[in-house]
Amino acid sequence: MKYEVEEVWFPLSEDILSWDKDFHELMLNDHIRMVAYEQAIKEIVKPGMKVLDIGTGTGILALWALEAGAEKVYGVEVNNKIISKAISRIKQAGYSERYEVFNMLSYELELPEKVDVIISEILGNLADNEDMTPILKDARKRFLKKEGKILPLSVD
């Protein structure tokens, strides 16, 4: 399936499990988005931190957190078709021992520890059409350390 740049995705991600590699390639090729995420992650994540990547997808955000020195990155992804791409990306970069991925909704996730940073790209092109508000509210409550940070910090 080919996606158009201006295509509006279904509200609340009703069709999320049908998103394929073309969908992910569209996002990966959005230069402004990718540069902004990489810079933000590399500013916030410090060596030794624990990170949760909600909607890890192809693993690119997790990779940048690991490159910034994260001691551990937990990735959670509901779409099992894309997880192998994330695992491969992280393994190829030499960080597989510091990356653990879960194929489930974040609501079902249990982690062995609280994290310093939660990163996500579950925005969609309407800011909250992937239902990020309740997802991140739950994640903040259950997984984030008191002094932790969430990226993105805001959506304009």
Image (spheres, rainbow, N blue to C red):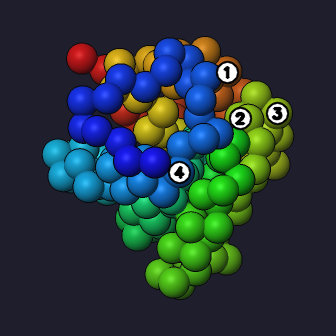
Callout 2, which amino acid?
A: Ser
Earlier along the polypeptide chain: callout 3 or callout 4?
4
Which residue is located at x 59 percent, y 34 percent? 16
Q: Which residue was labeled with disc 2? A: 106
Earlier along the polypeptide chain: callout 2 or callout 4?
4
Q: Which mark is residue 138?
A: 1
Element type where label 2 sits in the image: helix
Element type where label 3 sits in the image: helix
Seen in the picture, residue 142 relative to 63 is either above or below; the reply is: above
Distance between mark 1 and mark 3 Cα atoms: 11 Å
Give the image location of residue 34, x and y in percent: 27, 51
Distance between mark 1 and mark 2 Cα atoms: 8 Å
Distance between mark 3 and mark 4 Cα atoms: 23 Å
Earlier along the polypeptide chain: callout 1 or callout 4?
4
Distance between mark 3 and mark 2 Cα atoms: 5 Å
Distance between mark 1 and mark 4 Cα atoms: 27 Å
Callout 4, which amino acid?
A: Asp
Q: Residues within 10 Å of mark 2 (few under 14, many from 20)?
A: many
Seen in the picture, residue 101 relative to 151 is either above or below; the reply is: below
Are circles 3 and 4 on residues that touch, CB within 8 Å? Answer: no
Q: How many marks?
A: 4
Q: Residues within 10 Å of mark 1 (few under 14, many from 20)?
A: some
Are circles 1 and 4 on residues that touch, CB within 8 Å? Answer: no
Q: Which residue was labeled with disc 4? A: 20
Front residue of 9/71: it is 9
Q: Residues within 10 Å of mark 4 (few under 14, many from 20)?
A: some
Are circles 1 and 2 on residues that touch, CB within 8 Å? Answer: yes
Q: Which mark is residue 108?
A: 3
